[in-house]
Image (cartoon, rainbow, N blue to C red):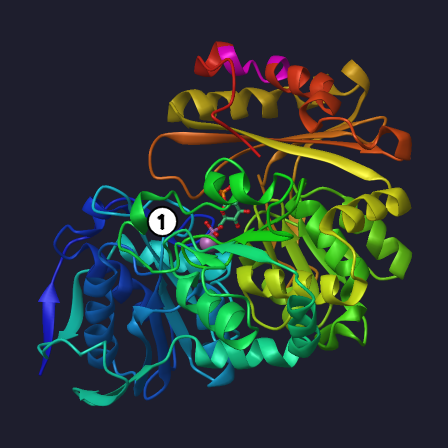
């Protein structure tokens, strides 16, 4: 039943910040998916007879790749495959399943926040036995293998019926199609006080959750509406569609505008939230108050003990380097360490496994904890709901109160999307070449290219973003995206700390105005890319 198919390498099968991401049309080339999956299997050792978790965010091509992955897992000697019904699994749910069942690893099919549909993007990520994204060492090995691959193994078996729960045999591998939501929902109940949230709802508290036509629809509907009792319709865009209903499933103020328009005005619901394509990101808003992801991490950390899962306190906090230092202030107050890692969730894995950090966050709408090894959108929503249920204050009151206590880190990210790749690399190269010369200018006290030494395994990751630190504690950070599929995206991160509560109500872009102007001139953004302004501001 096992067929060995001869193949030749494809160029550019290099995993980026989070897996291999390309246009759907690239993945549709004959052997493209097979080459990459076989390269993953060839790089792993000891999986014979073990379990593989398989699922994705339901975007175009998901169904085909799930079937291919099942056949290849069977042909390569896995003993069992756990597959979400309909081929669906959110990224955090997949992480949980790997951990819960002691699986060898998992394949998560998603291009996350990137657009879907036949002309959109597709992606494949490999998660290891701890439930977390493959570390850099492993993705480097996988990439090396893609360059020399000569054949792959696959069974000649028919498609598995993914819509029917239950077991079936594919070659010598047992396939189990499971409810994608059940285990995850059970885990959430162990972390949060669902009764307290039910009380809050009965007192008249309202919310809207925007699943953006992506994978969190079934998770949000089951947990928020059916289990907690929010009225039907609280979840919007709750049916996963192959093109996300035309949504760009990136939960920020620009792409979640339907939600923002409902929640921000007077008379809107008390709380609004959204998640991305694969369910690992979160957007949190209250009436008249957008919570930046950096602030959200800090506020969750400061209030964590109000929730059952974290009542015993936190061992530490970790944030990606470009994320604001708001969480650092909370960590200092709590007397726990705060770690600064490169961008991408894979860098949190070791800290979580070692019990050194409990909460982690990224400025890119990613927050999570030691409950899984991925960022987790609905987890963040439920943690906010639990805190709101205990504090009985509005989101706005909680956020402004936090600023009064800890000071406010004004924060914004400016993205220059799809710029010419050569120009973008030239810009970064020029900045790197001038690091020494920049110190002393404009109050810059430190200019470097961020490098990270993992405190657990000692590995070093270099070139993780150019940082400019100013004498008043402000920062500008420049890095190129590792998740885009067309040209290059330059991300510029801006941060300024304001301790004075009488200056906490300034518009963010205005508060950061001087830094914004400087960020453009210092890096010669317009001269080098032809862009006088960013395409997305968050
Ligand atoms: C972006 C974010 C990063 C995040 C990554 C994956 O990466 O900046 O913080 O971990 O996306 O998120 P980049 O390299 O484009 O800046 V997800 O939800 O798209 O898997
Ligand atoms: Co995502």
The image shows residue 442 at horizontal and vertical percentages of: 78, 15
Q: Which residue is found at the position 67% from the left and 78% from the top?
A: 195
Query: Under tag 1, what secondary structure?
Result: loop
Q: In this rendering, does residue 536 appear at all?
A: yes
Which quadrant does the N terminus fall into? bottom left
- Could you tell me which residue is drawn at 27 percent across and 59 percent down? 36
Residue 454 in sight here: no
Is residue 29 shown in magenta?
no
Vertical arrangement, residue 352 with respect to residue 519, above or below = below
Q: How many marks?
A: 1
Find residue 13 and report its horizontal and vertical position in percent.
30, 50
Q: Name the residue under label 1.
A: 14
Q: Which of 431 and 413 is in front in this view?
A: 413
Q: Is residue 523 magenta?
A: yes
| Magenta-colored span | 521-526
Q: Which residue is located at x 78 percent, y 61 percent?
A: 392
> Relative to 8, is 267 on the left or the right?
right
Residue 508 image position (x, y, % from top left): 70, 28
């Amino acid at each position: 039943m096992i067929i060995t198919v001869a193949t030749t390498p494809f160029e550019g099968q290099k995993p980026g910040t989070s897996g291999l991401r390309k246009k759907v049309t690239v993945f549709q080339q004959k052997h493209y998916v097979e080459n990459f999956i076989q390269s993953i299997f060839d790089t792993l050792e000891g999986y014979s007879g073990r379990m593989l978790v398989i699922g994705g965010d339901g975007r175009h091509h998901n169904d085909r790749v799930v079937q291919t992955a099942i056949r290849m897992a069977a042909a390569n000697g896995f003993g069992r495959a756990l597959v979400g019904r309909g081929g669906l699994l959110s990224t955090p749910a997949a992480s949980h399943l790997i951990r819960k069942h002691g699986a060898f690893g998992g394949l998560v099919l998603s291009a996350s926040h990137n657009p879907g549909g036949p002309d959109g993007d597709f992606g494949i990520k490999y998660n290891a036995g701890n439930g977390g994204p493959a570390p850099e060492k492993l993705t480097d090995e996988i990439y090396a293998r893609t360059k020399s691959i000569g054949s792959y193994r696959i069974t000649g078996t028919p498609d598995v019926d993914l819509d029917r729960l239950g077991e079936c045999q594919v070659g010598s591998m047992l396939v189990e199609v499971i409810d994608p939501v059940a285990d995850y929902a059970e885990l959430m109940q162990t972390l949060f006080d669902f009764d307290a949230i039910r009380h809050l709802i009965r007192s008249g508290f309202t919310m809207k959750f925007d699943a953006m036509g992506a994978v969190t629809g079934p998770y949000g509907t089951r947990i928020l509406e059916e289990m907690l009792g929010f009225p039907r319709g609280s979840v919007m865009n709750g049916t996963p569609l192959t093109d996300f209903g035309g949504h760009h499933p990136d939960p920020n103020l620009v792409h979640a505008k339907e939600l923002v328009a409902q929640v921000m005005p007077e008379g809107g619901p008390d709380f609004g939230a959204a998640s991305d394509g694969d369910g690992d990101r979160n957007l949190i808003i209250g009436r008249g108050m957008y919570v930046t992801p950096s602030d959200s991490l800090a506020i969750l950390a400061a209030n964590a003990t109000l929730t059952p899962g974290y009542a015993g306190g936190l061992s530490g906090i970790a944030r990606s380097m470009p994320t604001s230092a708001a969480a650092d202030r909370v960590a200092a107050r709590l007397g726990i360490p705060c770690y600064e890692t490169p961008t991408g969730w894979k860098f949190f894995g070791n800290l979580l496994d070692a019990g050194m950090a409990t909460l982690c966050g990224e400025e890119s709408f990613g927050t999570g904890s030691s409950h899984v090894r991925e960022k987790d959108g609905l987890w963040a929503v439920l943690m906010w709901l639990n805190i709101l249920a205990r504090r009985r204050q509005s989101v706005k009151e909680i956020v402004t109160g936090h600023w009064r206590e800890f000071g406010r880190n004004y924060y914004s990210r400016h993205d220059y999307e799809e710029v010419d790749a050569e120009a973008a690399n030239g810009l970064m190269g020029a900045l790197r070449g001038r690091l020494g010369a920049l110190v002393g200018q404009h109050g810059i006290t430190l200019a470097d290219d961020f490098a990270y030494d993992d405190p657990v395994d000692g590995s070093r990751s270099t070139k993780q973003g150019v940082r400019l630190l100013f004498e008043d504690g402000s920062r500008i950070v420049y890095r190129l995206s590792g998740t885009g599929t067309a040209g290059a995206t330059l991300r510029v991160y801006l941060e300024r700390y304001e301790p004075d509560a009488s200056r906490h109500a300034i518009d963010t872009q205005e508060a950061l105005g001087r830094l914004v102007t400087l960020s453009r001139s210092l890096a010669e953004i317009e001269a080098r890319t032809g862009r006088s302004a960013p395409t997305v501001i968050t």
